[in-house]
Amino acid sequence: MKVLFRAGFLLILLVHREQVTEAVSLETNKETDTVKAEDVCVAVDDSKPSDFLYIGNGSSGAIPVLQFKLSEIISFKSQFELRTFDPEGILFFGDIGGEHNWFLLALRKHYLEIQFPNDLSQTAITGGPVISDGEWKQISIANLNSTIIVTVNKEEVIKNHQPMENEDVEGKGVLRIGIGAMFPNSSLKLTLNPPLDGCLRNWDWVRQETPVLNRLIESSESQRCWKSVVPGSYFPGYGAAQFESHLFIDNLSMKETENWSLTVELSLRPVVANGILFAILDLKNNLSFSIALNDTQQAFTLTFAGKDLGSLRFPPELCSGEFQVQQLILANKQLVFKSLEDEVIWNVADDFEALQAVWDQPGTTVYLGGLPDWDPAAVNSYYHGCMRVKIQGNRVDVDTAKKKYGGIRSHSCPADLQLGVGK
């Protein structure tokens, strides 16, 4: 095996310059849009400190790629503080001289994991405490005498010895690191979901200055993190998340299929009480079902089979800053929509089987936070606020979306400005 990061972990910004410029301009322009005071339902603390680096922009192409010459390395140790609610994703990926000699630090099922190549394929080692609880944690990674040591809050959690071949690369070549993502056009296959909705601060990369990261953060709003966060998925009021319906379909027996039902639970904390929360589109992109917030009517409005079905008044606590749970149950040819204080039941016998057929059909899509951007009504459909979603009783991980607008945060929302509750 080649030297496993004999150089340690170093950073300097290289980047896909065109991709970064495009992604930054798109999100920065829209993040500076202001909400009219009279439209605000829940005010949030959207302040972003200039020394907080957001590492979840990989899916939009904004990947900081950093490098140092091995001859300039003065330490084999690096450390940073991480805050995340995301259970899975890449912290950083690096290599020396190409993909034959690489290293990965990631989260999998809430725990740290390191990966590196071996003679046959690759090795993965997982360990340590739960990381994705939203608390700041100091993480240290070092290569000491061919031994990889990972610590969390100064306690050793992973230690692995890797013997080196008789090849001294010290002083030769370049170490590259991609923060929050693989390098563009990488051929390596990883069995994890790459984007990590997380934040770094107080980094020290081999005891060298990294002013280029500071400049990146200062120049781009989308590269910064919120000061305080709470768990949930944040929709910024522009763009939606698209899923394939088969992600939520259980393997049902014939009897269970005859008794088919659909349950959706929406836990909401809206910044603006308007926009589509949940929608189903058939194979031909016809709107089969939707639930929306309607600020004008001060009610949830529902459409079914292309028709307005009815509405349910907003609960008095919708704008309290606390998450409000709404539940939809479609079963036995009835649709039940309820909050903690109210409930409405509609008879949908005429269209029940048609919606079931749409739901089971390959190509059916589910949208959260708005309609697809090609729809003329999309611009007025986007939800602005925090949301936690369960479909068929299972929590939806927004990172599993087939398509997701870059400004959506899958696992974190800015804290409520008044309640002041956040990590």
Image: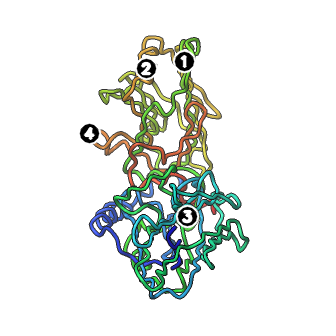
Q: Which of the labelled discs sits on residue 355, or is there none?
A: 2
Q: Looking at the image, which residue is at 29% across and 27% down? A: 284
Please state which of the two labelled residues, at mark 1 or mark 2, is closer to the viewer: 1
Q: Dots 3 and 2: beta carbons under 8 Å?
A: no
**Residue 344 figure quarter:** top right
Mark 4 — residue?
A: 376
**Residue 359 figure quarter:** top left
Residue 152 drawn at (x, y percent) = 68, 69
Foreground residue among 175 and 343 = 175
Mark 1 — residue?
A: 260
Foreground residue among 316 and 170 = 170
Q: In this view, does 393 lie to the left or right of 304?
A: right
> Is any part of residue 92 visible from this angle?
yes
Residue type of the residue flagged with mark 1: Trp
Mark 3 — residue?
A: 105
Q: What element carries label 1?
A: loop
Total marks placed: 4
